[in-house]
Image (cartoon, rainbow, N blue to C red):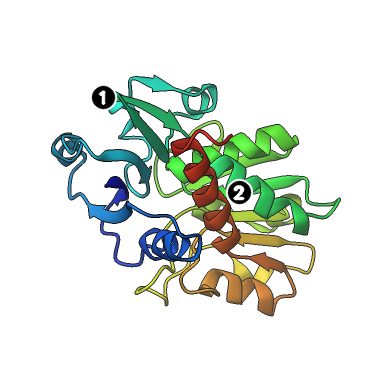
């Protein structure tokens, strides 16, 4: 049996297991199993890797950065952003990839307008690193927004004023705020300053319309959730595991 899976914590609303189960059934892919592996600490990965049938893993919150020390090899993209969401196992060696980059870029671009030239990236984790990588590639100026670790390229939520909202027409949520079951949560930004010129993208996909997106939609903004991104990155992972690239 060829085994694949997803590591993260707590994985209460993971899309991946169901997606791959349906993919295997529809495409007639036999002898393959995809499981969810909720790890309460990244150190638990060591035991999981002892499974000789395990060929590939996806990585989600909060381990996209913490998994790096376990890798034997990494793509240039992973090295640059310091975040990995896809691991291929071969002969006991782990190679880190980042399919979030492809997934986010292909999902984000179709709704981008010419005036969308500056972005606020909410969060500073592994997903934020992938988003930043894409922003750099597209030539979009950006700042991170965080509750902590404020620095040269990072501002605090309370620093988002009218001037910032006027300058930064793209707002991308990379945090889990608003994800099931905590659907009443949303990043603490000044939603009253959102206009029809803004583009709000939420990497959260469950629920389909988070409070973050709902508030933006009410103000006339362009909104997009992360479902397409997840599907694209999952398919990219499958290509990597099967060397179909």
Residue 21 shows which numbered tag? none
Q: SS for tag 1?
A: loop
Quadrant for residue 21, please give it. bottom left
Percent from the top left, x then y, of residue 231?
54, 57
Residue 155 visible in the shown view: no
Mark 2 or 1: in front is 1
Left or right, residue 23 beside residue 232? left
Please give the name of the residue rendered at 75% of the width and 68% of the height, measured from the top-left corner.
195
Q: Are marks 2 and 1 in contact (CB under 8 Å)?
A: no
> Is 132 placed above or below 8 here?
above
Left or right, residue 73 beside residue 111? left
Left or right, residue 213 beside residue 151? right
Percent from the top left, x then y, of residue 229?
57, 55
> Is 164 placed above or below 219 here?
above
Q: Could you say which is closer to the camera, residue 226 or residue 27?
A: 27
Number of numbered tags placed on the structure image: 2
Residue 21 visible in the shown view: yes
> Is 61 placed above or below 99 here?
below
Q: Quadrant of the image for the C terminus?
A: top right
Please give the name of the residue rendered at 53% of the width and 73% of the height, measured from the top-left corner.
208
Q: SS for tag 2?
A: helix
Going from the N terminus, do you reach mark 2 or mark 1 first?
1
> Is 93 placed above or below 217 here?
above
Percent from the top left, x then y, of residue 88?
38, 33
Percent from the top left, x then y, of residue 177?
42, 63
Residue 104 shows which numbered tag? 2
Other-residue count near label 2 (Cα within 10 Å), few / some / many at <14 / 14–19 / ≥20 = many
Other-residue count near label 1 (Cα within 10 Å), few / some / many at <14 / 14–19 / ≥20 = few
Between the residue at mark 2 and the residue at mark 1, the CA separation in whole angstroms equals 30 Å
Quadrant for residue 182, please give it. bottom left
Residue 92 shows which numbered tag? 1
Quadrant for residue 53, please give it. top left
């Amino acid at each position: 049996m060829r085994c694949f899976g997803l590591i993260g914590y707590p994985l209460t609303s993971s899309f991946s297991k169901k997606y791959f189960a349906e993919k295997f059934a529809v495409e007639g892919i036999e002898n393959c199993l995809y499981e969810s592996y909720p790890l309460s600490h990244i150190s638990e990965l060591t035991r999981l890797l002892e499974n000789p049938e395990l060929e590939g893993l996806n990585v989600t919150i909060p381990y996209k950065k913490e998994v790096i020390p376990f890798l034997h090899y990494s793509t240039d993209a992973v090295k640059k952003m310091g975040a990995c969401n896809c691991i291929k196992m071969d002969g006991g060696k782990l190679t880190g990839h980042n399919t979030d980059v492809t997934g986010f870029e292909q999902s984000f671009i179709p709704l981008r307008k010419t005036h969308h030239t500056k972005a606020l990236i909410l969060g500073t984790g592994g997903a934020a690193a992938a988003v930043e990588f894409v922003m750099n590639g597209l030539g979009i100026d950006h700042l991170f927004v965080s509750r902590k670790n404020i620095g040269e390229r990072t501002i605090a939520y309370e620093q988002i004023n009218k001037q910032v909202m006027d300058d930064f027409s793209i707002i991308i949520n990379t945090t889990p705020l608003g994800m099931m079951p905590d659907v009443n949560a949303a990043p603490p930004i000044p939603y009253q300053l959102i206009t029809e010129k803004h583009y709000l993208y939420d990497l959260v996909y469950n629920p389909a319309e988070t409070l973050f997106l709902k508030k933006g939609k009410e103000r006339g903004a362009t909104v997009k959730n992360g479902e397409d991104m997840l599907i694209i990155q999952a398919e990219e992972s499958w290509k990597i595991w099967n060397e179909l690239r």
